[in-house]
Structures are given as structure tokens and as C-alpha cells.
Image (cartoon, grey):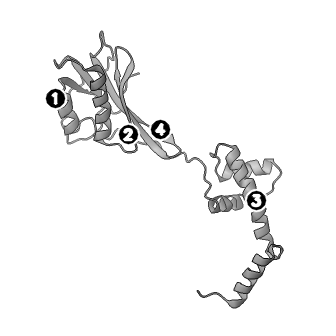
């Protein structure tokens, strides 16, 4: 390691006698626990801006850049409000069933019309996706799954749970409606609907949901 002898001796002397450290280092040692306290007291969601403003409200004068630097050193970060995630990605090359709902979300009996969709949720661990199948007659979720990825397996699992819970008749009287996202018009999803005797329906507009 290419370290000047004078630099090493100065560092060693400061370790033996902390009072010999520079003013900035002493100041940082005072600010670190204050920053961490404010961050923890506010559900660990505050970023550098809010921590800095709170410190100033408490009479602790500090530059914002200093708060940002010391938060980074301690691995502290606020909740990040990212851009809206696009969940409906149309698959233009896949055949798309007719819209059999158009868009009258009404049913006169159970297992007449199911509506499937999925959304996203921000958690401490990052974005998670929640797929669900709703029986329109009961306005009840009959199948759901949570995943960290927007895959066909993910929405298929929600459908399988609904099939297991409701066991609809394999006579083609049940309509399954979804948006035109690639997961719902995939070959595997379409084949599973056919196997279960369910009539597929896909909305004309992306992201059309049950209200």
C-alpha cells in the first residue's frame, strides 16, 4: 500500500488520542447518531431532504450535502417513489379473443363471469405484484398470488387457485375476462382456459378492470 509515513503516523496518533482528530471528523461523529435517530423515528422512510429539514427544525445546523453523505456512509435511505410501473404489456403477435363483456361486468349467478388482473405494491423489499381472479356475481376474490416478477406462471397460479376453490362446470358457460396483457393471452394461459372449459374474453382497451 502506497501510504506516506507521515500520513500513517498521523492516523495512528488520532486512533490513540481521538481529540487530535480534525473538526470535520468530530462533527461527523456527533451528527451520525442524530441522523440515524431521526430516520428511525420516522418509520425509516425519510430521505436526506426530510432528515435535513427535521434536523434544522430541532436546531441542529447542518448542510444538506453532509446529511446525504453521512446517510450514505451508514447505509440509510428513504423510500423511493419511482415511476408508475406498466403492468399491461400487450402481445401484438398473439391471437386475441373477442371482448365478450364489452364492458358490462354483470353476472346473475356464481361462476358466470370471472375477471382477472394484477397490480403492483411497494414494500420494504421492493416492488411485488399481486394477481387476482374475481367472481363478478359475488364480487369476491376467488384466486390470488403474489410474485416478484410479472410472469405467466404467476397469473396461472392465481387461476389454478380459483379453479380449485370454485370447481366450475366444464361446459363453456363461464367467461374469463382480462386485459390484453401478454401474460393473459399467452399460449399456456389460453390452453389452460380451454382445458377447464372456460370461454376467454379480452378487453379492447389495455388495463380495463372491474370497477
Lower position in the chain sequence, tag 2 or tag 4? 2
Q: Is residue 112 above or below residue 75?
A: above
What percent of the width, then of the height, locates residue 71? Answer: 65, 58
Q: Which residue is mark 4?
A: 121
Q: Quadrant of the C terminus?
A: top left
Q: Residue at x 70, y 44 (%)?
A: 41
Circles 1, 3 touching at the beta carbon (< 8 Å): no
**How far, Cα to Cα, is label 2 from label 1?**
26 Å
> Between 20 and 120, which is closer to the camera in this rendering?
20
**How far, Cα to Cα, is label 1 from label 4?**
31 Å
Classify mark 4: residues with Cα within 10 Å, few (<14), some (14-19) or many (20+): few
Number of residue marks: 4
Lower position in the chain sequence, tag 2 or tag 3? 3
Classify mark 1: residues with Cα within 10 Å, few (<14), some (14-19) or many (20+): few
Quarter location, residue 130? top left
Element at badge 4?
A: strand
**How far, Cα to Cα, is label 1 from label 3?**
64 Å
Element at badge 1?
A: helix
- Residue sticking out furthest to the front: 16
Q: Which mark is residue 195?
A: 1
Lower position in the chain sequence, tag 1 or tag 3? 3
Lower position in the chain sequence, tag 3 or tag 4? 3
Q: Which mark is residue 31?
A: 3
> Between 198 and 33, which is closer to the camera in this rendering?
33
Q: Quadrant of the N terminus?
A: bottom right
Q: Nearer the viewer, mark 2 or mark 3?
A: 3
Q: Which residue is mark 2?
A: 87
What percent of the width, then of the height, locates residue 107? Answer: 31, 13
- Residue sticking out furthest to the top: 108
Q: Residue at x 70, y 50 (%)?
A: 51
Q: Nearer the viewer, mark 2 or mark 4?
A: 4
Amino acid at each position: 500500500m502506497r501510504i506516506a509515513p507521515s500520513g500513517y503516523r498521523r492516523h495512528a496518533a488520532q486512533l490513540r488520542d481521538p481529540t487530535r482528530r480534525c473538526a470535520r471528523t468530530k462533527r461527523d461523529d456527533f451528527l451520525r447518531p442524530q441522523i440515524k435517530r431521526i430516520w428511525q423515528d420516522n418509520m425509516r422512510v425519510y430521505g436526506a431532504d426530510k432528515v435535513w429539514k427535521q434536523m434544522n427544525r430541532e436546531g441542529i445546523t447542518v448542510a444538506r450535502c453532509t446529511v446525504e453523505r453521512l446517510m450514505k456512509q451508514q447505509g440509510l435511505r428513504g423510500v423511493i417513489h419511482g415511476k408508475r410501473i406498466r403492468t399491461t404489456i400487450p402481445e401484438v403477435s398473439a391471437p386475441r379473443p373477442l371482448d365478450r363483456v364489452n364492458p358490462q361486468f354483470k353476472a346473475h349467478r356464481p361462476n358466470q363471469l370471472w375477471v382477472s388482473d394484477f397490480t403492483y405494491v411497494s414494500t420494504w423489499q421492493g416492488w411485488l405484484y399481486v394477481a387476482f381472479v374475481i367472481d363478478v356475481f359475488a364480487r369476491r376474490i376467488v384466486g390470488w398470488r403474489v410474485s416478484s416478477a410479472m410472469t405467466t406462471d404467476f397469473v396461472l397460479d392465481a387461476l389454478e387457485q380459483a379453479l380449485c376453490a370454485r370447481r366450475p362446470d366444464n361446459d363453456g358457460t363461464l367467461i374469463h375476462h382480462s386485459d390484453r396483457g401478454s401474460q393473459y393471452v399467452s399460449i399456456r394461459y389460453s390452453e389452460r382456459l380451454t382445458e377447464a372449459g372456460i370461454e376467454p374474453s379480452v378487453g379492447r382497451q389495455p388495463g380495463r378492470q372491474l370497477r
